Image (cartoon, grey):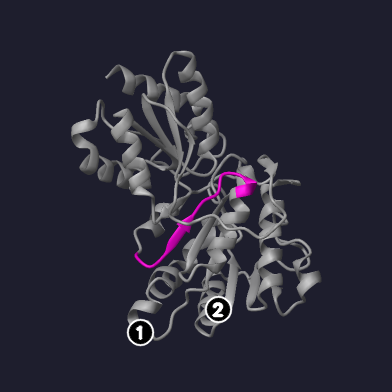
């Protein structure tokens, strides 16, 4: 199998999807001949022409409104929002149109072919407007699916699944991993199931749950914990909506402890939803309170990014506190 970084895997997935179905159309700011700000759409315009891969004006609400219209007419649009921080002008289109199209018509029409790609998260010194993790805003909206890959293999398989899913899907790409994460990726067409978590490592003492770039922090923290005799079970959620409740519940019933980590701020973060659900299902089996290791309840800082980010040391401290409770 060839080695790819995450950007190459995403580009490969788009190439395969466009080759297999001429209804697949890619568009967004600078995605054409420039290949996007991170080059995720490189060479797609050259290969498929300006009618199927093209630039849009810098108007996010317009990009998603246009995508909704295309999807409603039977196309399979893959719309790129250049940074997740700039998805908010399109918030109305996503939560009031994309998510509700099928429901308001009694399924007479829908925008199920829509996929929205966007890079998200910190770790690149992007400051206030290029570092946010807004997945929880959209997880509150029935009618959407949300997926987050952690490596190139997942990026390709989950993106192909998102493009072909009969529901609108938000695909958040951890930009810190675009070139940092490399690995073997099959050349052929394949899909990974949306809504199914992956048990990355089995263990018996504590469950560690994350998604996207935070998986690296969890794995590093688990290595530190293992040196102190703590057996960690590591789960990559992969899909925020729908999230794989049963896999997490089964793990916590076994370990009795749970640490959840994400880059987004604590208040209203998706870890809170996970914690509430797990305590409902596992209350009598919990050996300690469910711990959340997250970003801070402040705007994302520039010079203090390292202090803001939930790193492996913060996760390790949460593991120790949970074990000592």
Q: Position of residue 101 (x, y in %)?
A: 40, 78
Question: Where does the image place residue 222, in percent across and percent down from the top left?
Answer: 48, 25
Q: Is residue 250 left or right of residue 317?
A: left
Instruction: Find disc 1 in the rendering and name its residue.
Output: 105
Residue furthest left as drawn: 284
Going 59% across and 55% down the picture, which residue do you hit? 157
The percent position of residue 160, horizontal first and vertical second, equals: 59, 62
Which mark, by number, is residue 60? Answer: none
Q: Is 79 located above or below residue 184 in the figure? A: below
Q: Is residue 145 above or below residue 220?
A: below
Placement of the C terminus among the 4 image quadrants: top left
The residue lying toward the viewer, choosing from 256 and 307, is: 256
Residue 324 position within the rendered picture, expressed as x and y whole percent measured from the top left: 30, 17
Q: Are marks 1 and 2 in contact (CB under 8 Å)?
A: no
Answer whether residue 271 is magenta in the image. Answer: no
Horizontally, is 114 left or right of 292 in the view?
right
Q: Is residue 243 above or below residue 33?
A: above
In this picture, is 325 found above or below 94? Answer: above
Residue that protrudes farthest toward the top in the picture = 228
The residues colored magenta run: 142-153
User: Which secondary structure lies at badge 1?
Assistant: loop
Please identify the quarter of the rendering in which residue 256 is found. Answer: top left
Q: Which residue is mark 2?
A: 66
Q: Residues within 10 Å of mark 1 (few under 14, many from 20)?
A: few
**Badge count:** 2
* Residue 152 is one of the magenta-drawn residues: yes
User: Upstream in the sequence, badge 1 or badge 2?
Assistant: 2
- Residue at the right extreme? 46
Q: Secondary structure at mark 2?
A: helix
Q: Quadrant of residue 262?
A: top left
């Amino acid at each position: 199998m060839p080695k790819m970084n995450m950007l190459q895997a995403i580009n490969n997935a788009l190439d395969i999807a466009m080759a297999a179905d001429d209804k697949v159309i890619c568009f967004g700011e600078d995605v054409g001949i420039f290949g996007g700000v991170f080059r995720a759409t490189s060479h797609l315009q050259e290969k498929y022409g300006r009618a199927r891969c093209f630039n849009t004006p810098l108007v996010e609400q317009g990009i998603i409104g246009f995508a909704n219209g295309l999807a409603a007419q039977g196309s399979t649009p893959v719309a790129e929002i250049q940074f997740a921080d700039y998805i908010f002008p399109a918030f109305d289109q996503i939560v009031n149109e994309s998510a509700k199209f099928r429901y308001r018509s009694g399924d007479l029409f829908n925008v199920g072919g829509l996929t929205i790609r966007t890079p998200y998260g910190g770790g690149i010194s992007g400051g206030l407007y290029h570092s946010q993790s807004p997945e929880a805003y959209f997880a509150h909206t029935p009618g959407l699916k949300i997926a987050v890959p952690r490596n190139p293999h997942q990026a390709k398989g989950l993106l192909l699944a998102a493009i072909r899913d009969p529901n609108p899907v938000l695909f958040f790409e951890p930009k810190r991993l675009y070139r940092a994460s490399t690995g073997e990726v099959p050349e052929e067409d394949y899909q990974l199931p949306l809504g199914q978590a992956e048990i990355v490592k089995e263990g018996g003492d504590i469950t560690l749950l994350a998604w996207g770039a935070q998986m690296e922090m969890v794995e590093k923290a688990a290595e530190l914990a293992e040196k102190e005799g703590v057996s960690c079970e590591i789960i990559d959620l992969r899909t925020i909506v729908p999230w794989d409740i049963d896999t997490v519940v089964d793990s916590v019933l076994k370990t009795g402890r749970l640490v959840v980590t994400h880059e987004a701020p604590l208040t209203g973060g998706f870890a809170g939803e996970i914690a509430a659900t797990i305590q409902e299902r596992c209350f009598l089996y919990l050996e300690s309170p469910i711990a959340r290791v997250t970003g801070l309840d402040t705007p994302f800082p520039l010079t203090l990014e390292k202090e803001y980010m939930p790193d492996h040391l913060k996760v390790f401290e949460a593991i120790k506190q949970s074990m000592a409770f």
